[in-house]
Amino acid sequence: MHKKLDELNQYLQSLGSAIIAYSGGVDSTFLLKAAHNILKDSVIAVTLDSPVFLKQELYKTKEFCKKENIKHIICEFDNFSIEGFNKNPKDRCYICKKEMFTRIKKIAEENKIKHILEGSNIDDNSDYRPGLKAVKELNIKSPLQNAGLTKTEIRALSKKI
């Protein structure tokens, strides 16, 4: 497990700077904290303020970033305005993630940051996750998957970093 953390840290160091798609969940919080530990002020957290996310969760993301002194950008994001989203198709997650990461890419460009990271872990590969197709298409990086980290390992490591 520590070898995987070392791999993750080396990878993050190689990026130089990054934007983290930060939902406030276990995986994205761990990734954000690990990236901030390595890259310091060269990390920006981006959280989407959407009607499908609880305001309490948005508040938690704000508080975490404030406590950790991490630059945090909150982007208004109305899932219901995305063409096709309301029809609830099988690939709705793909439609939403594609739009979400397209917006985050614009934020990255405005901040002159090349790398956008998201918090999928290796366990996510065993589920039906159409959103991961959008992640690949848009060249969003998934460092927790690359390091081979499972959800259980992320939870354990979260207590140590």
Image: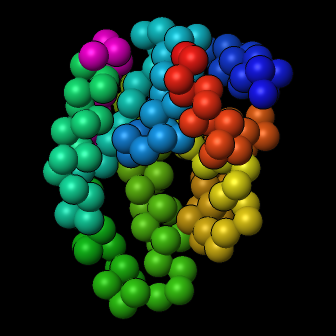
Which residue is more in the foreground, 80 or 36? 36
The image shows residue 98 at horizontal and vertical percentages of 50, 62
> Which region of the structure is painted magenta?
67-76
Image quadrant where one finds the C terminus? top right
State whether residue 50 appears in this view: no
In front of the other: 124 or 76: 124
Q: As drawn, is 154 to the left or to the right of 25? A: right
The picture places residue 85, in percent across and down from the top left corner, at 37, 79
Left or right, 130 with respect to 4, comes to: left
- In the image, residue 152 sits, relative to residue 130, either above or below, namely above
Q: Which residue sits at x=30%, y=26%?
A: 64
- Quarter where residue 125 is shown: bottom right
Q: Quadrant of the N terminus?
A: top right
Q: Is residue 55 above or below residue 155?
A: below
Please give the name of the residue rendered at 65% of the width and 73% of the height, measured from the top-left corner.
Answer: 128
Residue 15 coordinates in the image, percent (x, y): 66, 21
